Amino acid sequence: MDSIKNINNILGDFFNNHDKEKVYQAFLKVRWNEIMPYAIKIRTKNIFLSDQSLIIKLDSSPLKQELQILEGKILKKINEKKFPVNLRSINKLIFQ
């Protein structure tokens, strides 16, 4: 049984050899869509990663302001789910 790797080790090996940032960004997009209500999801135009910040492009200035107020709660929800293959947590949200 020593020769059989568990799924985490297999995924870890795979992601170490590929673009980890793109995988991480895709995971964060899925996570954003899981925790945000429909009204926010349809106003979200793009999500991308920059260092330990998640940049969220929105099409509504009032929504940007509301989400900035809730940044701490949103970060907590994003980070409470274990990231795959030991990826780091997000420290800041930037709404554009």
Image (spheres, rainbow, N blue to C red):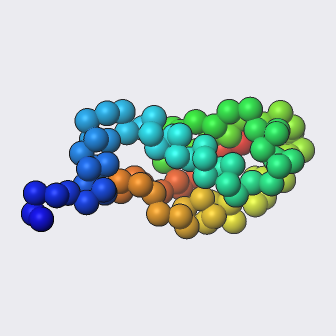
Residue 81 in the image: state x and y as whole percent.
53, 64
Instruction: Residue at the far front: name it.
Output: 1
- The front one of 78 and 53 is 78
User: Quadrant of the image for the N terminus?
Assistant: bottom left
Q: Residue 61: which quarter of the image?
A: top right
- Is 25 positioned to the left or the right of 40 in the image? left
> What is the x, y in percent for residue 13?
24, 45
The vertical placement of 85 against 96, above or below, is below
Q: At x 56% / y 47%, what residue is drawn? A: 28
User: Along the line of sight, which residue is nearer the eye, 31 or 6?
Assistant: 6
Q: Left or right: where does residue 4 sit relative to residue 89?
A: left
Residue found 37% across the figure and 39% down from its top:
20
Is residue 91 depicted above or below 61 in this figure? below
Q: Residue furthest right?
A: 62
Q: Nearer the viewer, residue 79 or 55?
A: 79
Q: Is residue 19 visible?
A: yes
Q: Position of residue 48 (x, y in %)?
A: 58, 36
Residue in view at x 63 percent, y 37 percent = 47
- Left or right: 40 as drawn, with respect to 16: right
Left or right? Give the position of 16 relative to 55. left
Q: Position of residue 27 (x, y in %)?
A: 52, 46
**Viewport quadrant of the C terminus:** top right
Residue 53 visible in the displayed image: no
